[in-house]
Image (cartoon, grey):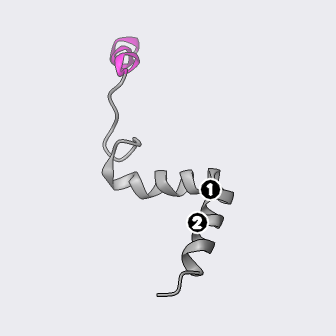
Amino acid sequence: MKSITSGLSHVGRYRLLGWGPRDHRNQWLETLGDMAQNRSQWRRCTHSLSSLKL
């Protein structure tokens, strides 16, 4: 069993498809996380955009 799992400790910088922030399919989730961390900034931005008269 040890010889089978020993290769897993050497994964390093490699990421599985679908599980990393560099995966374009999960970019929306990363953006959503950024928005949640910067709520006040997003609130100001959306407020100023909604007050524009087009």
Marks 1/2 in contact by CB < 8 Å: the verdict is no
Residue 17 placement (x, y as % from top left): 31, 43
Query: At 37% across and 14% down in the image, what residue appears?
Result: 6
The dot on residue 45 is 2
From mark 1 to mark 2, how far is it between C-alphas? 14 Å
Query: At 32% across and 51% down in the image, what residue appears?
Result: 24
The residue carrying mark 1 is: 36
Q: How crowded is mark 1: few (under 14 residues within 10 Å), some or many (20 or more)?
A: few
Residue 13 placement (x, y as % from top left): 36, 24
- The residue lying furthest to the front in this view is 53
Nearer the camera: disc 1 or disc 2: 2
Q: Does the magenta stretch include residue 10?
A: yes
In which image quadrant can residue 28 be found?
bottom left
In the image, which residues are magenta?
Answer: 2-12
Q: How crowded is mark 2: few (under 14 residues within 10 Å), some or many (20 or more)?
A: few
Helix, strand or loop status at disc 2: helix
In which image quadrant can residue 1 be found?
top left
Helix, strand or loop status at disc 1: helix
Amino acid residing under circle 2: Cys
Which one is nearer the viewer's eye here, 17 or 38? 38
Residue 49 placement (x, y as % from top left): 54, 75
Measured along the vertical axis of the image, is residue 16 above or below residue 39?
A: above
Which one is nearer the viewer's eye here, 21 or 31? 31
In which image quadrant can residue 44 be found?
bottom right
Measured along the vertical axis of the image, is residue 30 above or below residue 42?
A: above
Q: Which of marks 1 and 2 is nearer the N terminus?
A: 1
Q: How many marks?
A: 2
Amino acid residing under circle 1: Ala
Which one is nearer the viewer's eye here, 37 or 13? 37
